[in-house]
Image (cartoon, helix red, strand yellow):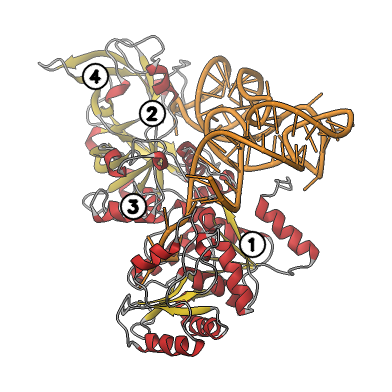
Amino acid sequence: MAEEKSLNFLEEIIERDLKSGKYTTIATRFPPEPNGYLHLGHAKSICLNFGLANKYGGKTNLRFDDTNPVTEETEYVESIKGDVKWLGFEWSEELYASDYFPQLYEFAVKLISKGLAYVDDSTSDEMAAQKGTPTQPGTNSPYRQRTIHENLKLFADMKAGVYPDGSKVVRAKIDMAHTNMLMRDPVLYRIKHAHHHRTGDAWCVYPMYDFAHGQSDSIEKITHSICTLEFVPHRELYDWFIEKLEIYPSKQYEFARLNMTYTMMSKRKLLQLVNEKFVNGWDDPRMPTLSGVRRRGYTPEAIRDFCDRIGIAKRDNLIDISLLEFCVREHLNKVSARRMVVFDPLKVVITNYPEGKTELMKSENYPENATGSVREMPFGRELFIEREDFMEVPPKKYFRLAPGQMVRLKSGYIIKCDEFLKDAQGRVTELRCTYLPESRSGSDTSGIQVKGVIHWVLAEKAVPIEVRLYDRLFNVEDMGALEDDFRNHINPNSLQVSIVYAEPEILNSKSGDHFQFLRMGYFCLDPDSTPAKLVFNRTVTLRDMWAKEVKK
RNA sequence: UGCCCGAUGGUGUAACUGGCAACACGCUUGAUUUUGAUUCAAGAAAGUCCAGGUUCGAGCCCUGGUCGGGCAACCA
């Protein structure tokens, strides 16, 4: 296990910092805003931040960036905490940017006192005009020259609730002609007479992200503040505040966010899917949210493995969803109990099997592990098999049932199809087969080798269950390249519900159980289940070489 | 027409910091298999965005281009 995996660029930076003695231990943080549910992109960040701290013996804080009371809710805080834990990580401290409101306020006062910030009465439109453009310098606000004394008084009044929302802001006094737009006198504080999910009505002025994030890192003595690429231009401001405030110098590093084929990671757009009912909530199994993939049956192990495999770099990427599916299958193959479930039943009557007789057949639960764990399946004269496991006129390499052809019933007997019945519409309604009594699974003395093995259930004991089959939510590979509205590209067939027939053992399923329905895919029990009706989500299909063969 | 990032098989990520491009997914073929799954084996696939330069030697360094992404919210 001592294989040396090459380091990503952040690990290189950290190892250099540790080796040089710059730090003796590292501190990272995962800083979500509680305004939505976490998704796979966040999983990448979580695995990175917590992974780095674990690897180098440091710590990771969970810090909620809750500086905008109008979009943030406790519901989100709870879901985020649950998701991080589910993924398998433990934070050192649970913190909130709102914990630092008093200190952040003092930081603003300090900047004002140093003549490095001022209160501006400009409207947002006026400020936008003052900003200039990336190619043209901005212009100074007419309020830029207010005295320190006046600014202090005004800011105190802002805090005291004297002014209405939007009437005034505090801005840093930097350079309206700066090539970095973010350095053109950015807003530090704005007035919002809004109820905050944690501080209630204690404040009516709230810091902007830029004035809260870096300082929060600094307060927590975060050594390596890791964020995504879009914050690269913010780093200059981040460093400016640290320098002017003379506080602990956390360093910001940026990596490329996760993009995946056939999906999107924008919290805003995911919220839209929820609000506009394209999906059934944040935890809809079609969503790339952690609560969604969890409900879908993805395991934390699989997601961590996935995050490990995609790597960390700075170039834009579009990860093929098949890699995630590979990780999920790999894990589920090892841990899922096997069950037989017939989706589209075709009745089989075994004509030489005694009427009224049943026997119990043993079948392995975990064929990948030598646990010896087995279950018993009732076998009898009338069975259901998959309709597609019979063909009246089979193609060349079809080795399932066909007139005169033999097949092995998994964990049962070898049967031979003697004849088939059709209804008036020409639809096959029943197969009449004979079985080889000496071919019983585990004590086969028939000497006959058949290529095809199919799953089955005893008709009389079959348990109807609901399965929900999911397909990709969007039918466009690169959602990021879209020119038009993403809602125009929703896959109308992303969810298909049907009633299928399971072996009786299915009744013992418990929530959280993962199964492989033989030859049909991986499934998990959905919370919508009731004792009267079990509901299963298809996590992912099995790889299917035959489907490819058929396409040829 | 500004500033900041980035560029290696189809997709990702590597290349011991200058020594004849590797790993994974995907794809193809074969073997095994009481899941057409799993497992195993083999194979196709990039000459590293382009053009110069330095060097015995460049994916790594230098110069100039090209292309892609980001930046003008009282969002984060």
Chain under callout 2: A
Residue type, label 2: Gly
Q: In which quarter of the image is the C terminus of chain A?
A: top left
Of labels 1 and 2, the one closer to you: 1
- Residue designated by label 3: A269
Residue at x-position 36% and y-position 67%: A126
Disc on the earlier residue, 4 or 1: 1
| Image marks 3 and 1: residues in contact by CB distance under 8 Å | no
Q: Where's residue A180, x and y in %?
A: 54, 59
Q: Which residue in the protein does label 1 denote?
A: A54
Q: Mark 2 points at which residue?
A: A412
In this view, the mark in front (3 or 2):
3
Depth order, front residue of B19/A542: B19
Single out the mark in the foreground, 2 or 4.
4
**Can residue A462 be seen in the rendering of this structure?**
no
Marks 2 & 4, CB-CB < 8 Å contact: no
* Helix, strand or loop under label 4: strand
Q: Name the residue under label 4.
A: A431
Labels 2 and 4 within one chain: yes
Q: For marks 4 and 1, give the CA distance.
A: 59 Å
Secondary structure of the residue carrying numbered label 3: helix
Q: In which quarter of the image is residue B50?
A: top right
Residues at discs 4 and 3 in contact (Cβ within 8 Å) = no
